[in-house]
Amino acid sequence: MSGKFRAAPNSTGDGDEALPYILIVDDSPTIRVSLARFVRDKFVPLEASDGEEAWEQILSDERIEVVITDLSMPKLDGFGLLERMRASEVTRVQNLPVIMVTAADDTDARERAIQAGANDFLAKNSDQVEFLARLHAQRKLAKAIRLLEESQRELREQSSHDVLTGLPNRGFFQQVASKEISLMIRQKEYFAVMKLEVDRLESINEAQGYPAGDFVVSNVAQMLADTIRDEDMVARISGKEFAVGSPYTNRLAAIVLAERLRKAIDGMDMEYEGNPIDATISIGIALVPQDGDNLEDVLVAADERLATAKEGGRNRFCAADKKHDEDSEEHMDMLSPDIDEALAMISHGNLHRLMPHLPKLLEDLIPLFELVNEESAATIDVNQVRSAIEALKR
């Protein structure tokens, strides 16, 4: 990065705020030039000759803060432009202030513009002072609305995310993981839940202070987020505890993921105020459906195994014994999936789970194959399908 500082475009260069952008929409070049001359010292005027051209500029240029538009124009008039803006799914476009230019006595046009969502009106014979006053008022209003929206967005973010780490918090994790567990149960799939704890965080706090502990938690959180798969979710659920939700993950896959997370944290090179810090984590692994069919039960199981990992010396994971898992897997494989679930299993590479159910799935499709033969020019050899089913059963 260059060490030079440059003034922003349209800035006065002496520390003043950059001039705001407005869009003037009118099919008359003379009127556009006249209005632009009115505002040039206080605003940066952009121009459009009709509503369609204005619409493209509004979508592409986020600097535009106020739109001034005539009513009667070719292609798309002022009313059409206003209605399109207010119907936009883009919040910035939907809330952009619009000042309609009307004749002083055109009451019908003003009423229609109000119904369409106009913010203000400007008579064609208005002077410069009134024109600038209207623009400044609408710009201030728009700025206040944007600040309010940003504050609301930040509050929503804070209500679902942990302030220190930026990860989802416990409430958000519970909400998302519960929905994913319901989906996995419907698809007869596995869902792994892990509880992870930063080992001996209290000792770090006592030796180097709570800021050092926060430093460790933040870095551990970042490493966890960088190490999990895209479909997984990691959340901070208490001061030193994290949770990971992992769909389509059986016992073996969960163990592989847990060991990868453990190694990633154990291998971190951290230093706080010149002092090296070694951090490790302990992990408890639980699974749906073996340990329960709801998040609360699975978290209890994961917490019990986390305690076992800590009692065993920390910097390790604990999972259910293999026999328990094999029994559950056999039970799961006895449940036959429907077509949608079978397609989901294929898309996630679970062909070994699908193979025992292929004969039944093909049998269920035979009426569909026969319908194809009767109602279309295509031909499916149903006898060959039946032979394949018998071969698969053997």
Image: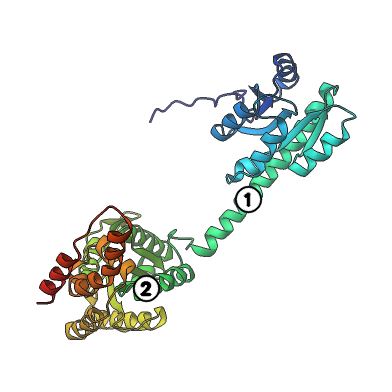
Quarter occupied by residue 184: bottom left
Q: Residues within 10 Å of mark 2 (few under 14, many from 20)?
A: few
User: Any mark on residue 149, and which?
Assistant: 1
Residue at horizontal 27 percent and vertical 60 percent from the top: 373
Query: Where in the figure is residue 137, as x and y percent of width and height?
Result: 77, 36
Quarter occupied by residue 122: top right
Tell me: 260 left or right of 205.
Answer: left
Seen from the viewer's position, the closer of residues 276 and 320 is: 320
Q: Residue furthest right?
A: 105
Query: Where in the figure is residue 387, as x and y percent of width and height?
Result: 13, 70
Dot 2 or dot 1: first in sequence order is: 1
96, above or below 35, in the image: below
The C terminus lies in which quarter of the figure? bottom left
Seen from the viewer's position, the closer of residues 134 and 352 is: 352
Label 2 sits on a secondary structure element that is: helix
The amino acid type found where label 1 is placed reads Glu
The amino acid type found where label 2 is placed reads Glu
User: Any mark on residue 202, and which?
Assistant: 2
Q: Is residue 15 visible?
A: no
216, above or below 286, in the image: above
Q: Nearer the viewer, mark 2 or mark 1?
A: 1
Residue at horizontal 31 percent and vertical 68 percent from the top: 339
